[in-house]
Amino acid sequence: MKIQNLNEINTTALAYMGDAVYEQAVREHVIKKGSYHVGNMHKLSTDFVNASAQAKIIRTMFDELSEVEQKLVKRARNRKYNTKAKNADPVTYKWATAFEALVGYLYLADENERLESVLSKAIAIIGK
């Protein structure tokens, strides 16, 4: 699916897709590490897939993003959400959602090389 204009898809939809794409990348990473016990896989995955980790990722890589990517992240971060964060403060939750929106955008825009780069950096930032 090629996206012509960043404003065509709302950032909540992008984050929805990005959540799934990031979760899959993390699961692949965990399996490649050789941890096959379900409890261990879940524990390792949750180190990556939580609001605090995702907020850390996007804050760390923000300056490395293109201008277009930075605008998207800011738009996603500044969006008013009606959902309450379960295990994070509102600011952390917004940053985490912005990371997911970026991943979702790259996936839907078929920017596969850039997506792989962002996902690799994300996993390296959390470092497990």
Image: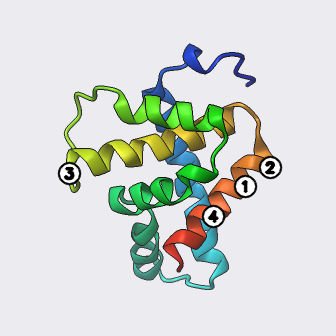
Measure the C-alpha gap from mark 3 to mark 2.
32 Å
Measure the C-alpha gap from mark 3 to mark 4.
24 Å
Q: Are marks 3 and 2 in contact (CB under 8 Å)?
A: no
Q: In which quarter of the image is residue 110?
A: top right
**Nearer to us in this view, 59 or 32:** 59
Q: For residue 121, which numbered disc appears in the image?
A: 4
| Mark 1 neighbour class, 10 Å CA radius: few under 14, some 14 to 19, many 20 or more | some
**Nearer to us in this view, 71 or 8:** 71
**Nearer to us in this view, 94 or 31:** 94
For disc 1, the marked residue is 116
The amino acid type found where label 4 is placed reads Lys
Tell me the residue at 58%/44% (across/down). Answer: 103
Quadrant of the drawing holding the N terminus: top right
Q: For residue 89, which numbered disc appears in the image?
A: 3
Residue 17 shows in this picture: no
Q: Where is residue 92 in the image (x, y as percent from the top left)?
A: 30, 51
| Mark 4 neighbour class, 10 Å CA radius: few under 14, some 14 to 19, many 20 or more | some
Question: Sequence-wise, which precedes: disc 4 or disc 1?
Answer: 1
Residue 126 shows in this picture: yes
